[in-house]
Image (tube, grey):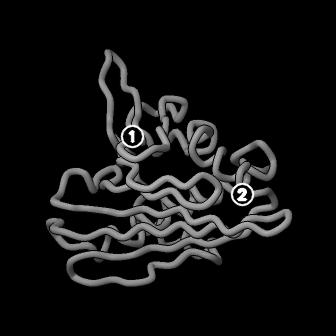
Amino acid sequence: MFRLISFSAAVLFMGTLAFAEVVNFAPAGFLVRHETTIDAPADKVYTALTSGVGSWWSSEHTYSQDSKNLSIDARPGGCFCEKLPNGGGVRHMTVVFASPGHLLRMTGALGPLQESGIAGSMTWSLTSSATTTKVVLSYSVGGYMQGGFEKIAPIVDAVLGEQFNRFKNFVETGKPVVK
């Protein structure tokens, strides 16, 4: 199962993410947003986002504990999926909008959010200049969750922030973690 960092660790980790923010919070949902500029053209960024997801997503935040089992079929109706042992699998999200080099939008509830009556929309927006690409990741979540969203919103923000940092590092250096 997705292993999420504890609430207190998530809050501490959030402090290291200058471009991360729980933009909006309400009793029925929340919106998180991450923004950065990547030193690469938009086509390279989009390819890494879609075809390379298994190379930059953290294995700690997968059901199989191996990010190489992740894939994104970047076309409408395509699956952000994970292969599980013995022929099993997980549909994390469904692609609803794919514009190579510009935008990828997927719907679905990630990790433990799948256990509740929740809908989510994740958008990766790319804006290119001559040699860089501005990337904005937003994830809007709404619906019903027992106990509410107050504790889970910062955890989701922190986990997505970790993936976002790993993604930027991967595109720029070929490695998701820079030491």
Residue 80, placed above or below residue 150: above
Task: Tell me the amino acid under the disc marked 1.
Answer: Cys
Indicate the position of residue 119 as horizontal and vertical percent values: 25, 62
Q: List the residue tagged with mark 1.
A: 79
Which of 176 and 101 lies nearest the eye of the viewer? 101
Instruction: Count every numbered label the image shows and give the total.
Output: 2
Badge 2 marks a residue whose secondary structure is helix
Indicate the position of residue 149 as horizontal and vertical percent values: 26, 73
Instruction: For marks 1 and 2, give the CA distance.
Output: 22 Å
The reply to whether residue 166 is visible in this rendering is: no
Residue in the picture at 53% in, 66% down: 137
Residue in the picture at 15% in, 60% down: 117
Residue 119, placed above or below residue 87: below
Left or right of 7 in this view: 27? left
Which of 96 and 176 lies nearest the eye of the viewer? 96
Residue 97, placed above or below residue 10: above
Q: List the residue tagged with mark 2.
A: 42
Task: Tell which residue pokes out farthest to the right in this image.
Answer: 131
The reply to whether residue 60 is visible in this rendering is: yes
